[in-house]
Image: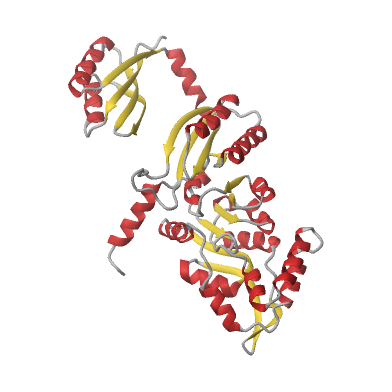
């Protein structure tokens, strides 16, 4: 039995104003039209609004179109009507099981060339861009920001036949064009993450604390030589850490306090941690550095927990030894698993951010692992990277819009004190 209703795609474009959608749908309501799909986008006060409409038996499409054209004339907008066959509609319905992925582009600025390159990769692999969303705020050209950031998010659909190849091409574009590109599946966990852990040295702070301490102790060259040996693979992390700490024997605790007070935070660190906390995330530091400094950063940023290596101090001086279990790469991953379990979370709901090779284990087990201003080998193995903006670029990677960040600030400022 044939379906007697008609289907039309109605597209409305023009200058946006309050009440426009209400006026269009009110006309359709008078003819008992069913809405099969609906969507809109507004760019610089201009709207593109679409409705896939089912016109029921007994109603005449030409009459509805005439009424909408009258309305379009009164509102100074344009209306276009495209008939959709039942076969076309059912094919569209059948495609709703397609895989969906998210591509996030982040940079100081975004150019047409960068956007074109990413869109071309999507087309090459037969993927359709369904929605494009600007995550970053509006940019003033008259009063540019000190640390600008721009981000857009593509929602793409289709069955991808070569995910590795697409990732490789996107990574090449990112490196060649100076932009960060994240590419991952769109699933329930993307919008339900609740725990973020950070490495400390060269991630939350712009320093490697042990190098700073070594300089203050007059053993900078010796510590640097051990670090280089570890990077060549001649020493593992635990061996190199113990040897470097041994060279700090006798350093006064007052020096540690002075260094801790003057550690430079990474660009965006305060903003990202503050926003995550206001959004209900738990935050933590998992560091191969030292908890003496981790505790200071915890207090400054309001971080929930810290796990790092403990320096032994006796009579106000370093003994050159460590106390307790060493926090290395494997320990970081184990701690992330432990914390997630204690918080009642799946690993898919966790995020880990770090810059070094000893961060790779926790980046690999987290639901979202992010290499931050990392070396190429770390950046490539982590799959997702922030290399061109501050640490608050993480907010874009998890889909938080600039206006939502500002809304959380306003909400906090206007809420009554407890």
Given residues 282 and 380, the one toward you in this image is 380
Quadrant hosting residue 45: top left
Q: Along the horizontal axis of the image, is 316 left or right of 37? A: right
Residue 277 lies, in percent from the top left, at: 44, 60
Residue 53 lies, in percent from the top left, at: 33, 20
Q: Residue at x 66, y 59 (%)?
A: 333
Given residues 227 and 339, the one toward you in this image is 227
The quarter of the image holding the N terminus is top left
Residue 187 lies, in percent from the top left, at: 53, 41
Q: Residue at x 19, y 16 (%)?
A: 70
Quadrant hosting residue 135: top left
Q: Along the horizontal axis of the image, is 298 left or right of 226? A: left
The quarter of the image holding the C terminus is bottom left
Given residues 195 and 402, the one toward you in this image is 402
Looking at the image, is 113 positioned above or below residue 330?
Answer: above
Residue 202 lies, in percent from the top left, at: 59, 61
Q: Along the horizontal axis of the image, is 251 left or right of 98? A: right
């Amino acid at each position: 039995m044939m379906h007697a209703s008609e289907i039309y795609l109605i597209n409305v474009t023009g200058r946006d104003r309050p009440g426009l959608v209400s006026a269009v749908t009110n006309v359709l309501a008078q003819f008992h039209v069913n809405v099969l799909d609906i969507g809109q986008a507004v760019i610089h006060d201009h709207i593109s609004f679409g409705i896939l409409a089912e016109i029921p038996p007994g109603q005449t499409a030409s009459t509805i179109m005439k009424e909408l054209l009258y309305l379009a004339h009164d509102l100074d907008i344009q209306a276009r009507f495209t008939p959709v066959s039942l076969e076309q509609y059912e094919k569209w319905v059948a495609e709703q099981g397609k895989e969906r992925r998210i591509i996030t582009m982040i940079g100081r600025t975004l150019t047409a060339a960068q956007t074109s390159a990413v869109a071309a990769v999507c087309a090459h692999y037969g993927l359709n861009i369904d929605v494009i969303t600007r995550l970053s705020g509006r940019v003033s050209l008259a009063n540019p920001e000190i640390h600008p950031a721009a981000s857009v998010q593509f929602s793409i659909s289709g069955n991808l036949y070569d995910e590795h190849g697409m990732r490789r091409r996107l990574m090449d574009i990112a490196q060649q064009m100076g932009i960060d590109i994240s590419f991952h599946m769109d699933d329930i966990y993307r919008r339900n993450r609740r725990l973020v852990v950070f490495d400390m040295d060269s991630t939350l702070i712009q320093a490697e604390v042990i190098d700073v301490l070594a300089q203050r102790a007059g053993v900078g060259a010796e510590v640097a030589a051990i670090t280089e040996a570890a990077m060549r693979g001649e020493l593992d992390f635990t061996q190199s850490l113990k040897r470097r700490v041994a060279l700090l024997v006798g350093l006064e605790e007052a020096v540690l306090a002075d260094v801790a007070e003057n550690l430079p935070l990474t660009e965006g660190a305060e903003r990202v941690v503050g926003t995550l906390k206001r959004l209900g995330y738990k935050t933590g530091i998992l560091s191969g550095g030292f908890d003496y400094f981790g505790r200071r950063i915890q207090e400054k940023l309001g971080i929930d927990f810290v796990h790092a290596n403990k320096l032994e101090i006796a009579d106000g001086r370093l003994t050159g030894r460590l106390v307790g279990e060493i926090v290395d790469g494997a320990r970081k991953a184990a701690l992330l698993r432990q914390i997630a379990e204690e918080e009642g979370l799946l690993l898919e709901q966790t995020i880990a951010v770090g810059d070094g090779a000893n961060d790779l284990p926790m980046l690999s087990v987290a639901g979202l692992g992010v290499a931050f201003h990392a070396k190429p080998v770390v950046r490539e193995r982590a799959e997702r990277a922030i290399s061109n903006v501050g640490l608050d670029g993480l907010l874009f990677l998890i889909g938080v819009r600039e206006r939502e960040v500002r809304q959380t600030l306003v909400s906090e400022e206007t809420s009554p004190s407890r």
